[in-house]
Amino acid sequence: MIRMMKSMGRSMASMVLAQQQAPHPSTCYSSLSAKAASSAAAIEAERCIREGPRNNWTKDEINSIYHSPVLDLLFHGAQVHRHTHNFREVQQCTLLSIKTGGCSEDCSYCPQSSRYGTGIKAQRLMNRDIVLEAAKKAKEAGSTRFCMGAAWRDTIGRKTNFNQILEYVKEIRAMGMEVCCTLGMLEKQQALELKEAGLTAYNHNLDTSREYYRNIITTRTYDERLQTLEYVREAGINVCSGGIIGLGEAEEDRVGLLHTLATLPTHPESVPINALVAVKGTPLEDQKPVEIWEMIRMIATARIVMPKSMVRLSAGRVRFSMPEQALCFLAGANSIFTGEKLLTTPNNDYDADQQMFSLLGLIPKAAEFSQKEADFESDKIAEAASS
C-alpha cells in the first residue's frame, strides 16, 4: 500500500511538472503569429531604422519586400517614412514643358515623339518672360520646386537654347525656388555648367528594368541613361531618377528598376514613381490603368530600400481618388506635382489638391538648399537687388 501511494505521488508530481513546462496554448499562438508577422518588409524596415540606408541590396531581398502582404508593406513603409522624414510634409512641385514635341526618340509611352500621331506639334523653346511668369505663379501657388522639361534626345548641338536655359535656371533660383531640369542626355561639361547656374536637381528616369527597357525604347541605351546620372552626380547636382509602371512590364521588372536605383553608389535624392498615362496614338495607348495597390507596393518598397530619398507621387496621380492618394502618402510618398499639366498630360486640379492637404493635415514642404546653395542664393538675391 505504501509502495502504491509513493508511486502515485511520483506520477502526479511528473504530471504537474510537465504542465508547468508545457507552453500555454495562447503562448504558442502568439509565437506562431509573431513568426508569421515577420515579413521581409518588417525585417528590412527594422534593419533600416536600426542601421540606416545601404546600397548592397540584392534583387531577392527587394523582391521579398515588394511581395510582402500589402497591408504589412504599407505599415512598414510608413514606419520607415516617419523615422526618416517629417511624415506630414509633402513638397509641391511644378513641371513645365519649355520645349514641346518633335522629339526624335521612340519612347513608346511618350506623346511628344515625332514618330507617333498624337496631335502634338513641335514647338520652339519658350521665351524667357513666359517661363519666368510660370515660375512666379507656381511659387505663389505653393510650389517650392520648379522643373523644366525639353523634348530632346540630348543637348548636343543646342548651344543657344542651352545657354538660354542656363539663364532661366539662374533667374528662377533667385526667386528662392529649387530648380530641376530634364533635357535628355547630358555631356559632362554641360552638367558642370548647370551646376554653376544653380541647378538643384536633374531628372533622368531609367523608366523600367534593364531587361525590359528594350521593349520600350531603342533610340537610347540603358547605359547612356546611367552615364548621364553619373555626370550629374559628379557635378554636384542632386539626382532625380525613377520610372514608370504600367508599360506592360512584369513585377520582376519593377523590382529590377528599384534594385538598380537602390544600388547606385549614392541613392537618388529624388525618386519619381509614375503610373502610365496612356495617350492615343502611342504604341501603349491600350495599356490598362495602374491600380492603386501597384502604386502602394512601389512607393512603400522604394521608401524602405531608399529611406532618405524624396519619393514623388508623379504622373498618373490624376486617376487616384483622395483616399487612394492618402494611402500613397502613408506608404512613404512625400512629393506631388501641381499645375494643370505634367508636360503634356492632364494633372490634378489645384483646388482639389489644396482641399486634400487641408483634409489630410499635410504641410507644404519648404525648399531645401545646402549651405553652398544657400550662399549662392543670397549672392543672387543681392545681385538682383543692386541691379
Image (spheres, rainbow, N blue to C red):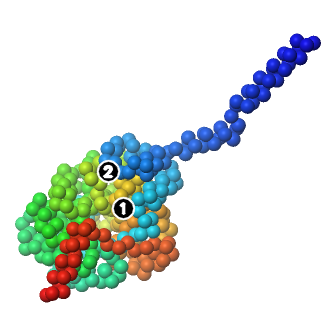
Q: Few, some or many C-alpha atoms within 10 Å of disc 2 (few <14, some 14-19, many ≥20)? A: many
The residue closer to the viewer here, 199 or 240, is 199
Identified by mark 2, the residue type is Ala
Identified by mark 1, the residue type is Val
- Residue at disc 2, secondary structure: helix
Question: In x, y percent, where is residue 169?
Answer: 18, 74
Which residue lies under the disc numbered 1? 311
Quarter residue 22 falls in? top right
> Residue drawn at (37%, 67%), measured in percent from left and top?
335
Quadrant position of the N terminus in the picture: top right
How far is the residue under mark 1 from the one under mark 2?
A: 13 Å
Q: Quick one: which residue is furthest to the right in this view?
A: 1
Question: In x, y percent, where is residue 263?
Answer: 29, 48
Question: In x, y percent, where is residue 331?
Answer: 45, 59
> Residue drawn at (19%, 73%), measured in percent from left and top?
376
**With 40 as the anchor, is 136 left or right in this view?**
left
**With 51 as the anchor, is 145 left or right in this view?**
left
Task: Determine whether 278 is above or below 46 in the image.
Answer: below
Task: Determine whether 58 is above or below 294 in the image.
Answer: above
Which residue lies under the disc numbered 2? 262
> Residue drawn at (12%, 76%), measured in percent from left and top?
164
